[in-house]
Image (spheres, grey):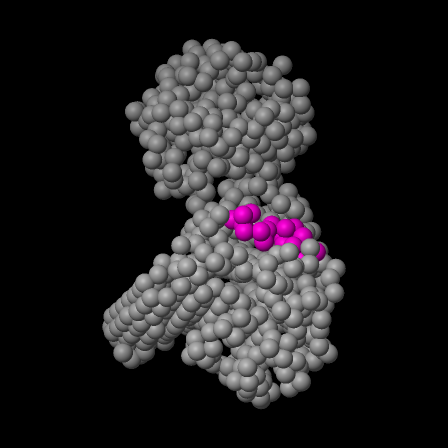
Amino acid sequence: MFLEIKDLSVKIENKNILNGLNLNINKGEVHAIMGPNGCGKSTLANVLAGKEDYEILNGKINFKDNDLFDLNIEERAQEGMFLAFQYPVEIPGVNITPFLHSAINSKRKRMNEEEIDNLSFAKLLKSKASDLGINIDMLKRSVNTGFSGGEKKRYEILQMSILNPDLAILDETDSGLDIDALKIVTDGVNKLKTKDNSFLIITHYQKLLDYIKPDYVHVMVNGSIVKSGGSEIADEIEKDGFQKFQ
Amino acid sequence: MNSETLNTLDSYSKNKYKYGFVTDIDNEKPKKGLNEDTIKFISLKKNEPDWMLDWRLKAYSKWKKMKEPKWANLSFPEIDYQDIYYYSAPKGFEKKPKDLSEVDPKLIETYNKLGIPLEEQKVLAGVAVDVVFDSVSVATTYKGELEKLGIIFCSIGEAIQKHPDLIKKYLGSVIPAGDHSFSALNSAVFTDGSFVYIPEGVKCPMELSTYFRINAENTGQFERTLIIADKGSYVSYLEGCTAPKRDDNQLHAANVELIALEDAEIKYSTVQNWYPGDEDGKGGIYNFVTKRGLCAGKNSKISWTQVETGSAITWKYPSCILKGDNSIGEFYSVAITNNYQQADTGTKMTHIGKNTKSKIISKGISLGKSQNTYRGEVSFLRKADKARNYTQCDSLLVGNQCGAHTVPYIDSKNNTAVIEHEASTSKINEDQLYYCRQRGLSHEEAVSLIVNGFCKQVLQELPMEFAVEAQKLVSISLEGSVG
């Protein structure tokens, strides 16, 4: 099993957010989690990425034969987990090129691969940027600083394409995007999809799933998954909302 | 702040200072303590003319009547001026060696360890270096090449011998000996330092650099630097400094004077990395430095850039007196304090001439149990019509036990003056750290990146050759790890 979440319960500040959640993802699969606001979707993404604000009450997560709780945030990232943030944070004064260059090399170091040199990295970054329709001038700016919502999301996808993760988690990537930006972002995701990597797409609306076709759709309510199935579930939600699952 | 952040902060406190070694070399020192005999000894050792000795003795008599300035936000035990050696020279330096073959190989090895090779072919391309070890200048590189342009770059001791007219005219002209007790002390006992004169119309083609090293125990270093840029000339100058790890505090009280005549420009950069003391606040350099520049002529410009990471105590306010009309003064500063370090640093911009402009960008970063103060004074005199100042002070706090303070004074006697002041204080942002780490960067790498980003506005003012070094130094001061 590639990612296996077993009976996961999590709380934050005395409030239970996840309650006995189970989820299995195999290599090459695209999963979507849908649910109403406050159901725990983003918490799941952050618990997977290793954010430290949460208290794990119960459960186990296995990722690529590792007990995920043995790895800290950066080790999980280096093992191939990528979280595209809902609200990417601005880091003034830090240029995207050295930032991503250090990121890719720390991953390569962990995988015992040779580090990539400045010149090759600059080339790689330029070519990935142009694939995603990102202007070269944008690469001269500081990470996320002064970017519009759409630019930030495109940057997340650019970083994802550079780091080439085994498991990419997209947390509400569609929020705040107009239809053109949504198309660019989802095109990027579709280009990255191979039989060796997996995607976990967290979304509130069904719109995103018009562009990225999931193999499985899960409905999450009150911190657990209440229904799983194929993309037909997304259509049900589109029609009737989350009401009937609650 | 979460537990991991605190752990990493803890590991920062294990401060490892990579320049903390001692060179085992015979020193020649007078007796400890300060009196007229000490000054006569120094003057004699330097083979100085009588007028220089008189100048020193006058400064000494002023010093005797003065008290240390006490207004800074610093606490430290009283300095015992009688428990310090005021002169220390590696044996055999009665005369400055003519070339490197005359220099003790141990000294050359010291500078190689510090990453400052003295052989010219190995010196950073395009940088001329003057090296001061304890109290004497060891070597000045690229001298011949500079002489062809009429540029004088030598130790101040040599300048006193060879260029007495320039010294008599300018030494103490910007920082009078009686300015305050540290300037009086320096004027009485200064031992070496650099002298630069750029003739009219000459743009100095390479960076000039001085590297200061305190080696001997219980020794104060009192260097004196004087830079004169004649009409229409330009020079960029950089100083660097380190000292061995010692449990006792050592005193460093330098004076630096800059004079820019009409249309001249001086850019002065400092990377200060004196030994800061250990994680319990034991040892380290007391750094009481007076740096002042005079924009004497019209359209002249003086720009100070400093990266202050070392010293147990930093007391330093590189300043500009903007006398010439349209002259410009700039101050760019990064000050990082860790463990028990204390820094009280900033600048003074005195607008005298018309249309004078000044700009202050200060970035303070506090870690551990340190205290970091920006202190600045901007004043506009009566005739400073349409003068302008822009000040930006940003402080970044890492951890819960450190302090950041901003003390700006503004004094305007001219109502056409325009003053802008911006200040911010922030804590290192957990969301930024999370974001960086999610991309695979370690906690330390993430902190270093964020802090370097915070300082970027200042670091980019450094000469290219040193900007990378300074970035590394910033990372090292944060990590406490050997680079």
Most foreground residue, A125 or B93: B93
Front in this rendered view, residue B245 or B109 = B109
Q: Nearer the viewer, residue B103 or A221?
A: B103
Residue B444 seen: yes
Q: Which residues are magenta?
A: B106-124
The answer to whether residue B114 is magenta is yes
Can residue A220 be seen by looking at this rendering?
A: no
Residue B19: image location, x then y, percent: 66, 54
Side of B240 relative to B263 (left or right): right
Seen at 31% across and 72% down, the residue is B297
Q: Residue at x 66, y 73 (%)?
A: B87
Magenta stretch encompasses residue B92: no
| B284 to the left or right of B303 | right
Residue B149 horizontal/vertical position (percent): 39, 60
Q: Is residue A35 left or right of residue B90?
A: left
Quadrant in the picture for the C terminus of chain B: top right
Give the x, y percent position of residue B224: 53, 71
Pick whichever, B300 or A43, lies toward us: B300
Who's the residue at 68% across and 63% down the image? B215
Q: Residue placed at 40% from the left, 21% from the top? A: A188
